[in-house]
Amino acid sequence: MKPGAVISEPGSTVRNRTGGWRVFRPVFDMKRCIDCGNCWIFCPECCVSRSEEGEYSANLDYCKGCGICANECPTEAISMELEEK
Amino acid sequence: MREMLHGSKAVAKAVKLCDVDVVAAYPITPQTPIVEYIAQMVADGELRAEYIMVESEHTAMSACIGASATGARTFTATSSQGLAYMHEVLWIASGMRLPIVMVNANRALSAPINIWNDQSDSMAERDSGWVQIYVETNQEALDSVIQAYRIAEDREVLLPVMVCMDGFVLTHTMEPVDVPQKEEVDRFLPPFEPEVKLDPEEPVTMGALGEPQWYMEFRKQQDVAMERALHKVKEVDAEFSRVFGRGYGVLEKYGDDDAEVVLLTLGSLAGTIKDVVDGQENVRLVRLRLFRPLPEEDIAEALRGASVVGVLEKDIALGLGEGALCTEVKKLCYDYGIDARVLSFVCGLGGRDVRMEDVEHAIQVCRQAARGEKVNRTTWLGLREVAP
Amino acid sequence: MKVVADIPSYVKCRHTCEASLSASRCFRFRQLLKEVSDEELFASGHRACSGCACALAIRLALKAAGRNVIVTQPTGCMEVVSTPYPETAWRVPWIHVAFENSAAVASGVEAALKALGKKDRVKVLAFGGDGGTVDIGFQALSGALERGHDFVYICYDNEAYMNTGIQRSGSTPYGAATTTSPPGRESFGNRTFKKDMPRIAAAHGIPYVATASVAFPLDYMEKVKKALSIRGPAYIHVHASCTPGWGIREEKSIEVLRLAVDSGMWILYEVEHGRERVTYKPAMKRPVEEYLRLQKRFKHLTDEHIAVLQQYVDERWKEVFGEGPSP
């Protein structure tokens, strides 16, 4: 514990896996994807990424299931499906 | 070099000697000349510092916090309402463990509005986690500012320090002051190099949310730092004394050690009391210099043998019916098994002159108590008869 | 971010395109997005509500700013959700002091950087919510702007005190229900119009002021970059929705912000060295009611109050775009 509650581990909230908050999970249909990047740029959790091959996916460790990506997708390539726990 | 200096100028000279990087201050009587002198030094290129002409005391302290966190040596000065306006951020400065040094020109709090000296302003901040030093002379003000940075920046301490000097009585009064050589001060006070600071090379988060499972530990750390500060104040003062030939300790004892009546006070009032004590038998003075952390053991030692302790102070703890320091002395007497009667003498509020006759009256009351006569636990010195 | 070069002709694509309705501009949007940094300086795992546009406002600003910044933040949602000790979402140096002093702390940081000779390498970025900016932090901000510190202040405006449970601020719009401006027999919700903070900032004569919206990320990030590149104080006021505070579905938080712009409730412009420029003109003006209907905070409004808002918007629209309301 550094004096004054200083935190010297940048980005350490990654330890807190917020994926557990999720009710719906985003499912990407890459056949419909036009690679516009909306799902990536509009994600408040910084958890959508694009692979070298151009495949988009959400990191389910952190995805809270808000559905912004699906709502902002111009081609309806993302659907929100009920999380089965 | 010996110069005739106002207390304000002595402080400004200390700030310059300490190579302060950032000054953020807002004018308030009677502190104003301090920041005016500093502004002139910066304008003349004598002091290479950023002077932020802030729009309030709250911002003055907030800016000092930001600057200190970024690794700059910072200074501010204020008084009375300004200190009260800072109240919120004072706690944050100490909670964040930032070694900011501030001079408080002691002045009464409103209402009624009053710009003259008493010590209610800094007394009201006694639990804010700041080290508090009360000085008697302009020389001590200058020396204490230099010492303050050494104490504050020590990695075992890391606490802000408030140097309290009586408004007008010191700030606007000329006294001969020995101004140390820059080289000597440089040797005594190395540059500020914090272990952590805001720097993109090594990003840290400062001012995080402390939830119930963490908050208490950080308060405890502060309390431990206060204990360490007590030793550090003594250590730094001893070293200062070796280098510059002037030392003050955490308190000053004056007069016959065996005297059964002891007067206890803070700040410049000690000057008047010394004059009175000089002409009387069986009474001595203890001037407390370090008020936070309270050097209880040292005070207890200084009070040994006393049958009556009269605490003369320029503040009133409303609702308690006595001065704040008096209560604390009673407490330490209990802890240290000192069997003395402790009496409160409230004086000098709002700049009311404390005359020698007032001090003599206090001594007289103490002597009555020593003889076992009935006296009030609190006496207001120099008070006009008022209708309730 | 790699983006393919073929231009789709999806009609639906239009509404997500920031710049205009034309497909070629849509291509430009994607090209520009390609240039946006992949680096996430605001880490996952923060505790913001699901669908929080304010978290996005921070994420995007940091993408634009890069690593060489020191961030100051007042007390508020984004402070609370990002730094529960011993964790922090921040990958840049960050400091929180109190509620009303983000700009004051930034003043000190900037002065220290100058004093220590680091000013050319490190930028200062201050955040504040609307409460911490237009209300309690107003004086500190005004002082910092007037003194000319070289820093950028970003107000993320979710139009009420959300952290404490949705109380009205000076930035709450007309008619909105909050816990301290509730509708009732004697009340239709908030009685006042939003304090025009960007105009107030501009009145300080600072070199750069802009409004932005999280729904227009490229426009927003461009403004952050410009603000950081200009010497002196810059102020950006970014509209950012709050799902519980506005009473919207989580997935709608961007859509609602876009509707704010398309209806004229929020106008995107910048004032650079005194010259004003609208940075986005909606192709079609949507009725304010469409914007209001998405949000629970406005659901109690009668036609009469909606008409007041529409008139307010029409007047501003005319002032800015120089024409009457489009059909």
Image: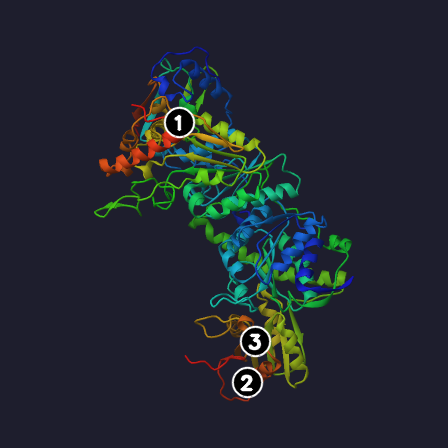
Q: Can residue C245 be seen in this view?
A: yes
**Mark drawn on residue A74:** none
Q: How crowded is mark 2: few (under 14 residues within 10 Å), some or many (20 or more)?
A: many
Q: At numbered mark 1, what does the secondary structure look like: helix, strand or loop?
A: helix
Please give the chain letter of the residue carrying mark 2: B
Q: Residues within 10 Å of mark 3 (few under 14, many from 20)?
A: many
Q: Mark 1 points at which residue?
A: C321
* Residue at the limit of the structure toward the left, as seen here: C185
Q: At numbered mark 2, what does the secondary structure look like: helix, strand or loop?
A: helix
The three-letter amino acid code for the residue at tag 2 is Val
Residue B238: where, in percent of width, then height? 71, 63
For the residues beneath circles 1 and 2, the answer to whether they share a chain is no
Residue B91: where, in percent of width, then height? 51, 55
Whether the residues at callouts 3 and 1 have beta carbons within 8 Å, the answer is: no
Determine the residue positioned at 68% across, 60% down: B9
What whole-number distance in Å separates the C-alpha atoms at marks 3 and 1? Answer: 72 Å
Q: Name the residue under label 3.
A: B312
Q: Mark 2 points at which residue?
A: B365
Sequence-wise, which precedes: disc 3 or disc 2?
Answer: 3
For the residues beneath circles 3 and 1, the answer to whether they share a chain is no
What whole-number distance in Å separates the C-alpha atoms at marks 1 and 2? Answer: 82 Å
